[in-house]
Image: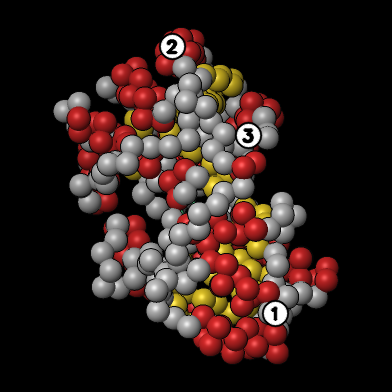
């Protein structure tokens, strides 16, 4: 028996909770889908990062005195620590809110290397933050367990948390028609876009790729071509790919450094763009693969279909912006941009979706770092 997302939200409604903010997580995919289907656009906000979601919950609470729910993957807990500690904590503004946290890397459950440490310390982090929490799985009687916790949230006016184990929530079967995948079949699959990019990059180029399926595809493509895997795969630290690439570009001024970012990832720490733009990182090409969603964790929408990345890049001080949505456009834009001084942003519009049988990197993060640094000639 799994917990139905509808049942879960009904328990929360007993405490008036009818507003959700957060960043999606694969482990919470079914809950996210239910929230998105059930609540209006004013009641469910997918934020750029998890810290924003906590701040939003705080403002929403102060506006009408009803606590709200913030959901996230435990990898996003780090992004929330500052607003939780310096704002929402009972010793500061004392704001009630329910955190629902997907527990990747739970000790004893096999998971990817980037989740192991975070999974092992999640409970300790909640303890040190002084956040009362319960752990739930598919067998949990959610009403029985959550009610005392939510009472604590209200009576003590403080953040509390529910830590969610893998495979807790059952599937839902309906998706609101206006929120269904809107990408047509004609759009370019990400893997094909990456394949063209790997064809046109020179051997000397230095590649830093983003969190989620992009890095998995880069890894698999290199393997299937028999090429050495010296691209840096940003397996964790979503949103920091462009800053890592900026650091590499500063330290290796004679190399062309290419950041392969996602739209969700770019939005998560978008403050990095003006910092890149205002420091004349002339050897940096920042590629944003824009599928307008968090495809790696279930395809939940980002706002990247509603904003002008061109304007953001140019207003942030990038020297040039290019866009492409076909393989021929990628090739032709690349030959033009290769003549220019950076930082340059290339936005590639891609389709939602990925291969079902996509693998995961078989080398360890330490091996990846070593191969990357060897390629740079720094070790
Ligand atoms: C701080 C943090 N929050 C959430 C996640 C979970 N997560 C992994 S990939 C991903 C989506 C990335 O979206 P985007 O950059 O648009 O790339 P796409 O998956 O669409 O290729 C999310 C939310 C994470 N790894 N780290």
Residue 5 seen: yes
Question: Which of the 4 image quadrants contains residue 190?
Answer: top left
Circle number at residue 44: none
Mark 3 surroundings: few (<14), some (14-19) or many (≥20) residues within 10 A: some
Mark 3 highlights which residue?
305
Q: State which mark lies toward you, 2 or 1.
A: 1
Alpha carbon of mark 3 to alpha carbon of mark 2: how far?
22 Å
First along the sequence among labels 3 and 2: 3
Q: Position of residue 267 (x, y in %)?
A: 59, 43
Mark 1 surroundings: few (<14), some (14-19) or many (≥20) residues within 10 A: some
Looking at the rendered image, the quarter that the N terminus falls into is bottom left
Q: Residue furthest right?
A: 63
Residue 302 seen: no
Specify whether 175 is left or right of 157: left
Q: State which mark lies toward you, 1 or 3.
A: 1
Mark 2 highlights which residue?
328
Tell me what residue is drawn at x 56 percent, y 72 percent: 7
Foreground residue, 66 or 225? 66
Specify whether 122 is left or right of 106: right
Mark 1 highlights which residue?
15
First along the sequence among labels 1 and 3: 1
Tell me what residue is drawn at x 34 percent, y 66 percent: 105
Q: Position of residue 184 (x, y in %)?
A: 52, 27
Q: Within 8 Å: ligand 1 and the Cβ of disc 3?
A: no
Q: Residue furthest left?
A: 226
Judge whether 23 appears above or below 357 on screen.
below
Judge whether 365 appears above or below 84 on screen.
above
Q: Position of residue 220 (x, y in %)?
A: 25, 36
Q: Secondary structure at mark 3?
A: loop
Looking at the rendered image, the quarter that the C terminus falls into is top left
Q: Secondary structure at mark 2?
A: helix
């Amino acid at each position: 028996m799994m917990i139905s997302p509808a049942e879960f939200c009904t328990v929360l409604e007993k405490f008036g909770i009818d507003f959700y903010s957060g960043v999606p997580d694969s482990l919470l995919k079914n809950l996210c889908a239910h929230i998105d289907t059930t609540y209006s656009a004013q009641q469910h906000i997918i934020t750029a990062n998890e810290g924003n979601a906590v701040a939003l919950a705080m403002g929403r609470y102060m506006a009408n005195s009803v606590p709200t729910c913030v959901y996230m993957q435990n990898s996003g807990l780090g992004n929330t620590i500052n607003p939780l500690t310096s704002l929402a904590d009972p010793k500061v503004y004392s704001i009630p809110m329910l955190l629902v946290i997907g527990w990747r890397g739970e000790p004893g459950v096999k998971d990817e290397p980037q989740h192991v440490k975070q999974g092992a310390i999640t409970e300790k982090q909640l303890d040190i933050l002084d956040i009362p929490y319960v752990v739930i799985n598919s067998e949990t009687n959610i009403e029985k367990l959550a009610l005392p916790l939510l009472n604590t949230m209200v009576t003590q006016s403080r953040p509390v948390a529910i830590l969610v184990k893998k495979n807790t929530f059952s599937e839902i079967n309906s998706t609101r028609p206006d929120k269904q995948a809107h990408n047509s079949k004609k759009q370019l699959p990400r893997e094909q876009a990456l394949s063209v990019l790997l064809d046109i990059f020179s051997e000397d180029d230095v590649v830093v790729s983003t969190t989620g399926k992009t890095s998995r595809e880069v890894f698999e493509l290199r393997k299937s071509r028999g090429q050495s895997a010296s691209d840096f795969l940003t397996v964790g630290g979503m949103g920091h790919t462009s800053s890592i690439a900026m650091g590499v570009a500063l330290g290796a001024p004679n190399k062309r450094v290419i950041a392969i970012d996602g739209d969700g990832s770019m939005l998560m720490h978008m403050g990095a763009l003006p910092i890149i733009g205002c420091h004349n990182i002339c050897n940096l090409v920042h590629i944003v693969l824009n599928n307008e969603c968090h495809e790696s964790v279930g395809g939940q929408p980002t706002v990247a279909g509603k904003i002008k990345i061109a304007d953001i890049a140019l207003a942030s001080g990038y020297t040039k912006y290019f866009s492409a949505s076909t393989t021929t456009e990628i090739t032709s834009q690349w030959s033009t941009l290769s003549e220019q001084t950076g930082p340059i942003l290339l936005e590639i519009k891609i389709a939602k979706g990925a291969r079902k049988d996509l693998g995961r990197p078989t080398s360890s993060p330490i091996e990846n770092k070593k191969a990357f640094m060897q390629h740079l000639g720094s070790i």
